[in-house]
């Protein structure tokens, strides 16, 4: 919506004295008058399109069974064996945790983006479309740092949302938040872009779109769309002291989402490019120095102040030093750390970028090669434990007694994935992985993580069937790390 600005000066039928007064008035700065808007932005088309591309996600997490010392009813012995209680002196109570959120269909063949915190540790994912059809979802990959996850449902011809460019968003532009707050499906709220590249110190990647469109619990993973109905962000969090909307909502820009989704599909993990500095906003540095009684003049009040340059990093190799102020990456202006992070996440280790910085108020541009978190330029390929295609839980106490086991993990469900390809079936009890005993899901995940970083990239599993037969599997995680 454009605002027409006009300055009107009328000088009709003036006397000589009035003419000079008019000339003085013209020489002075004329007051700016803002005309009334000629029309309202129509958001109905964007809303109608977006709701069909936003899904309702229900997750179930089966916590470890706990022994209950509840007093037994006389009926327990009668019905105990029928319902599987075993007739013992204590009962195992399965704790089931349920949650919900939203997701956005980004391709017609079933790929859906949501928040990592919506599906993290889920044993079962159910996806409900706007037409009320339901499908089981499986995790393709997750990224805790950006709080994004990619899941998939097995169907086709889905209404994928058009993806817009969040970099082109302007402050004050109209946006819609679409999701399922408080289990109220297909809810649309409207607002404006309140700020960009907002840092909240809550995630590894800090560059959120701030909006006053109402975002509540259950909106997580939903869509932030522009007036054209294009996806510009994934709703991630709200700022509230009550847990409900209080005027501030935050979304992950599509520029970050696109990179994360691409990497999760191709590598199974996000390729994080590290520039090799420790720094922060110039304004924060200047304020700290003022508090210490020092008056600082860096030649700019914008950019990223370099506090430290590790000797083995890309920045050190390119010649950056402590005290430099980074002002641009590949010609894109950088005014704060959040903007620098947003530019870097678009790149992969091994990419060359030009970095412009101030040193003693003089502008210098250097080329450097970005590295990964291990300090090399290699691409890291990783298989997310959640994407292996199995649901694991600790072996129930009764089963341990029957099979004389001290621990292990029970495969309670198998979906498409590398474990199924290796022959792992439902009901198998995993005892060891790569010569390490496993008793908890976290222990299993740690072994998978270590295997991802090894040269062999294989899980050697020793297991047992519920009939007591010894089993062995070799689960290939993929090609050696490159």
Image: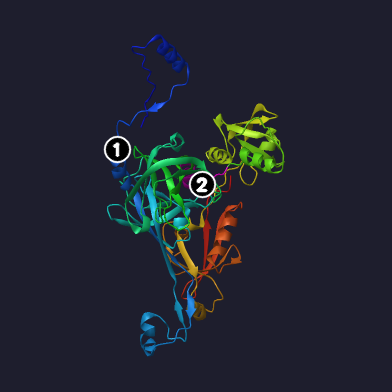
* Front residue (pair 202, 352): 202
Q: Which residues are magenta?
A: 257-272
Instruction: Say which quadrant the N terminus sits in.
Output: top left
**Residue matched to label 1:** 42
> Measured from the top left, where is residue 352 in percent x and y?
59, 33
Q: For mark 2, does the 10 Å Cα neighbourhood hold few (<14), some (14 to 19), or many (20 or more) residues?
A: some
The chief SS type of the magenta part is helix
Is residue 184 a member of the stretch shown in magenta? no
> Measured from the top left, where is residue 422 in percent x and y?
48, 59
- For the point 52% across and 51% down, which residue is it? 478
- For the point 38% across and 41% down, which residue is it? 175
- Asked if residue 190 is positioned above or below residue 139 in the image, the reply reads above
Instruction: Say which quadrant the C terminus sits in.
Output: top right
Check residue 284 in the rendering and tell me which mark sits there, or answer none: none
- Asked if residue 3 is positioned above or below residue 74 in the image, the reply reads above
Work out whether residue 114 can be spotted.
yes
Q: Element type at marker 1?
A: loop
> Measured from the top left, where is residue 388 in percent x and y?
48, 57
Q: Nearer the viewer, mark 1 or mark 2?
A: 1
Work out whether residue 353 can be spotted.
no
Distance from label 1 to label 2 (Cα)? 41 Å
**Residue matched to label 2:** 267
> Measured from the top left, where is residue 183 in percent x and y?
35, 58
Left or right: residue 66 compared with residue 59 = right
Instruction: Work out which residue is located at the far left of the displayed protein and give it.
Output: 131
């Amino acid at each position: 919506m454009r605002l027409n600005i006009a300055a009107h000066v009328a000088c009709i039928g003036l006397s000589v004295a009035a003419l000079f007064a008019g000339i003085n008035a013209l020489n002075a700065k004329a007051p700016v008058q803002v005309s009334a808007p000629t029309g309202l932005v129509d958001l109905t088309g964007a809303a109608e399109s977006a709701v069909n591309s936003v899904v309702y996600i229900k997750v179930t997490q089966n916590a470890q069974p706990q022994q209950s010392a509840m007093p037994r009813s006389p009926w327990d012995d009668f019905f105990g064996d029928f319902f599987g209680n075993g007739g013992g002196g204590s009962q195992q109570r399965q704790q089931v945790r349920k949650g919900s959120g939203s997701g956005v269909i980004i391709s017609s063949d079933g790929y859906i983006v949501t928040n990592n915190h919506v599906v993290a540790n889920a044993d079962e994912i159910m996806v409900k479309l706007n037409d009320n059809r339901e499908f089981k979802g499986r995790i393709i990959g997750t990224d805790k740092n950006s709080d994004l996850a990619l899941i998939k449902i097995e169907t086709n011809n889905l209404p994928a949302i058009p993806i817009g460019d969040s970099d082109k968003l302007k402050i004050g532009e109209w946006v819609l938040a679409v999701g399922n707050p408080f289990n109220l499906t297909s809810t649309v709220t409207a607002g404006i872009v309140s700020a960009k590249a907002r840092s909240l110190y809550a995630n590894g990647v800090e560059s959120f779109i701030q909006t006053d469109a109402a975002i509540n619990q259950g909106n997580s993973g939903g869509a932030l769309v522009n007036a054209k109905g294009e996806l510009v962000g994934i709703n991630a969090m709200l700022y509230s002291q009550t847990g409900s909307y209080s005027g501030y909502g935050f979304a992950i820009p599509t520029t970050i989402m696109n990179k994360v989704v691409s990497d999760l599909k191709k590598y199974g993990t996000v390729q994080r490019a590290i520039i090799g500095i420790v720094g922060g906003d110039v304004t924060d540095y200047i304020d700290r120095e003022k508090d210490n009684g020092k008056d600082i003049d860096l030649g700019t009040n914008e950019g990223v102040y370099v506090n430290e340059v590790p000797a083995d990093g890309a920045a050190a190799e390119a010649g950056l030093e402590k005290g430099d102020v980074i002002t641009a990456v590949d010609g894109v202006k950088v005014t704060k750390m959040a903007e620098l992070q947003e530019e870097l996440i678009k790149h992969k280790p091994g990419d060359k970028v030009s970095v412009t910085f101030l040193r003693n108020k003089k502008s210098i541009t250097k080329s450097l090669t970005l590295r990964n978190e291990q300090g090399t330029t290699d691409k890291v390929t990783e298989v997310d434990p959640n994407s292996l295609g199995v649901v694991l839980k600790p072996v129930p106490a009764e089963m341990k007694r029957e099979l004389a086991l001290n621990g292990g993990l029970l495969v309670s469900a198998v979906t498409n994935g590398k474990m199924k390809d290796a022959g792992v079936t439902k009901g198998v009890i995993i005892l060891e992985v790569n010569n390490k005993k496993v008793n908890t899901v976290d222990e299993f995940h740690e072994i998978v993580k270590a295997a991802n970083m090894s040269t062999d990239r294989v899980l050697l599993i020793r297991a047992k069937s519920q009939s007591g037969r010894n089993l062995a599997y070799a689960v290939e995680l993929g090609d050696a790390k490159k």
